[in-house]
Image (cartoon, helix red, strand yellow):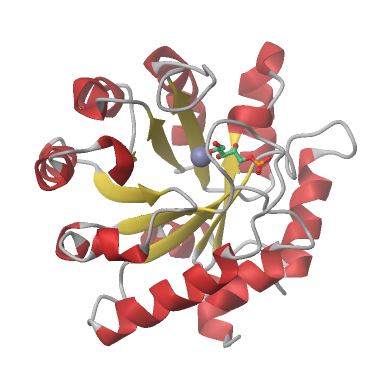
Amino acid sequence: MSRGREEKIQIAASILSADFSRLGDEVKQALEAGVRRIHVDIMDGHFVPNLSMGSQVLRSIRPIADKFDALLHVHLMVTDPDRYLADFVRAGANSVSVHVETCPHLHRTIQEIRTLGARSGVALNPATPLAALDEILTEVDFVLVMSVEPGFGGQEFIPSSLDKIVRLRRMLKERGFDQVQIAVDGGIHIQTIGPVARAGATVLVAGSAIFNGHASVADNLRELRTAIGQKKPGSRSRQRRDLT
Ligand code: DX5
Ligand code: ZN
């Protein structure tokens, strides 16, 4: 992996696995350890078989993220995401991803996210082919490749996701959309993070590998960074510019 590419890779902390009784502190620990992107999973019990949180949680962590000049990403795993876009952007989302499987009018949904002032992302379930991106690539800032079935933290990485990331990276290059970020979500830990980064991902979303009872948030992040050859987080200004 080239030095430039390696530095562009960002680890995003998914708070789904955090201890919600002290969420602010968990977020702060990740930010103090150099994370500049917090991933917030919104689940409705319909599109995925689980419930998680609403925009008030996002609103409550926004001031903490601001102190570190960090970004909040909202991953909407809900049917009819259009109903909630404005709510989440108003609550402080810098970027929002919607699942293609939930959007009959994807172009309009993506446009709406941008009109609201956030970066737009399209998420693909493991069995959804890359072809679903064909007509929307011109409009998106990033693609979120799900490497587990959405709905729960702590699941096993689906191995075929690696080839999907490689093919997506190639597709973006061939079509001249190299600036589109590839985020990968699910089963990212010290064994899988290296192969995922080498396959071409630029944003690595990790939940249970960062927030768990085994080690501190800082130690977990250090191990993840070591696994992708990053010694320490880049400078604040540089990271900020690279983020989607
Ligand atoms: C799963 C969520 C993920 C989840 C990842 O539906 O979208 O963001 O937090 O958790 P881990 O990293 O534990 O697989
Ligand atoms: Zn997620």
Whether residue 67 is visible here, answered yes or no, is no
* Left or right of 132 on screen, residue 206: right
* Left or right of 70 on screen, residue 155: right
At 43% from the left edge and 26% from the top edge, which residue is drawn?
A: 62
* Left or right of 88 on screen, residue 59: right
Q: Nearer the viewer, residue 178 or 134?
A: 134
Q: Quadrant of the N terminus?
A: bottom right
- How far from the left and from the top, in percent, is residue 169? 41, 76
- How far from the left and from the top, in percent, is residue 61? 49, 23
When the figure is inspected, residue 177 is found, relative to residue 1, above or below; the finding is above
When the figure is inspected, residue 43 is found, relative to residue 202, above or below; the finding is above
At 46% from the left edge and 23% from the top edge, which residue is drawn?
A: 43
Q: Quadrant of the C terminus?
A: bottom left
- How far from the left and from the top, in percent, is residue 4? 51, 82
- How far from the left and from the top, in percent, is residue 231? 73, 69
At 31% from the left edge and 76% from the top edge, which residue is drawn?
A: 172
Q: Nearer the viewer, residue 46 or 153?
A: 46
